[in-house]
Image (spheres, grey):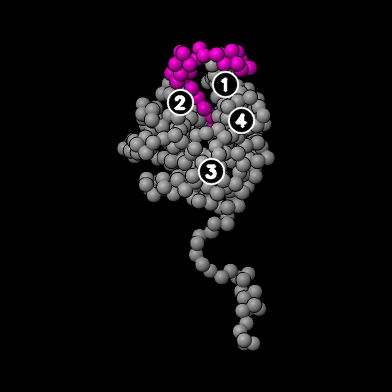
């Protein structure tokens, strides 16, 4: 089964639909399998105190204004839905609250995503699992008990899923990535395990693919210098194209593990393995 590569647009579009479409174009040109967005109901996810807190941004001077500026509404997602269908690429989202999950059902996306920050939000997980769609569950910041509970719920509700090893710092330090957790999660839960990376550079994400990750997700941006908290942990267009190319090369190189002599090796063996003069 081919590694499922996700271009996480998230909120890197900065509330600009044209920027979002340009990033979708990059994902298509790169050969990614899907693009992903995020959806929040601000008053459900954040407290009034958090939303009223001061914060300078292109949209105003409070947290609420900043977050409203980054949030796409239903009409924008209708445009994204049509655009992705026209471009022939899957799209889906990570909802941060039950209301958002229910609202976004109208688009009938093929996949769901549980963001690391929401893995302990059991009402949201139940709303996701009842849809019975293949769900990517990120495990950044999660305790063993939280992952146990999420896995148990999805199995109890008969919803297909895979875990994603993740370190939720932006950007993540290479020495903190702990890629061997891919093996740990595979062994403990007996399920597919992907990788959601927030590091700078590409080599470690390619290494995750070589270690058996069934999916790889990286944030995509048009320019890492753009406004936004996720931009520094994102990959620019040329880098994303190299990432997809290198992951596909790794897939091709891994083979089936059966030791054999290639037809192309036989004439070389006949020439180099002569023993009569020894």
What residue is rendered at 44% in x and 37% in y?
A: 139
Q: Earlier in the sequence, mark 1 or mark 3?
A: 1
Q: Residues within 10 Å of mark 2 (few under 14, many from 20)?
A: many
The span shown in magenta is: 36-61
Report the front residue among 53 and 90. 53
User: Is residue 237 within the magenta segment?
Assistant: no
Q: Earlier in the sequence, mark 4 or mark 3?
A: 3
Mark 4 crowd level (few <14, some 14–19, many ≥20, 10 Å Cα): many
Pair 3/2: label in front:
3
Confirm or deny contact between disc 4 and disc 3 (CB under 8 A).
Answer: no
Percent x, y of residue 69 = 58, 18
Quarter of the image for residue 14 reads: top right
Whole-angstrom CA distance, mark 2 to mark 1, is 14 Å
Residue at mark 1 to residue at mark 4: CA–CA distance = 13 Å
The numbered mark, 1 or 4, whose residue comes first in the sequence reads 1
User: For the residue labelled by badge 3, is the local secondary structure a helix, a strand or a loop?
Assistant: helix
Residue, disc 4 = 231
- Who comes first in sequence, dot 2 or dot 4? 2
Q: Which mark is residue 96?
A: 2
Residue 175 image label: 3
Question: Which tag, 3 or 2, sits closer to the chain's start?
Answer: 2
Q: Which residue is mark 1?
A: 70
Mark on residue 51?
A: none
Q: Earlier in the sequence, mark 2 or mark 1?
A: 1
Q: CA distance from mark 3 to mark 2?
A: 29 Å
């Amino acid at each position: 089964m081919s590694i499922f590569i996700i271009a996480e647009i998230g909120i890197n579009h900065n509330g600009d639909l044209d920027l979002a479409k340009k990033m979708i174009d990059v994902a298509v040109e790169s050969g990614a399998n899907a693009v992903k967005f995020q959806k929040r109901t601000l008053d459900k996810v954040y407290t009034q105190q958090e939303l009223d807190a001061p914060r300078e941004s292109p949209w105003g001077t409070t947290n609420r204004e900043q977050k409203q500026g980054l949030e796409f509404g239903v009409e924008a997602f209708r445009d994204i839905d049509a655009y992705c269908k026209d471009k022939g690429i899957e799209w889906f989202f990570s909802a941060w609250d039950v209301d958002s999950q229910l609202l976004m059902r109208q688009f009938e996306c093929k996949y769901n995503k549980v963001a690391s920050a929401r893995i302990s939000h059991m009402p949201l997980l139940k709303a996701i699992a009842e849809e019975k769609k293949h769900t990517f569950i990120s495990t950044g910041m999660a305790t063993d008990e939280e992952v146990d509970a999420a896995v148990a719920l999805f199995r109890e509700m008969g919803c297909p899923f895979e875990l994603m090893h993740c370190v939720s710092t932006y950007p993540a330090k290479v020495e903190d990535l702990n890629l061997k957790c891919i093996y740990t999660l595979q062994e403990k839960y007996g399920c597919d395990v992907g990788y959601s990376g927030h590091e700078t550079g590409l080599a470690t994400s390619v290494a995750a693919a070589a270690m058996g990750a069934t999916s790889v997700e990286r944030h995509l941006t048009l320019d890492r210098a753009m406004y936004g908290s996720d931009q520094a942990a994102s990959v620019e267009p040329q880098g994303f194209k190299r990432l997809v190319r290198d992951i596909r090369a790794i897939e091709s190189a891994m083979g089936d593990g059966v030791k054999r002599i290639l037809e192309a090796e036989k004439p070389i063996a006949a020439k180099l393995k002569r023993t009569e003069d020894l």
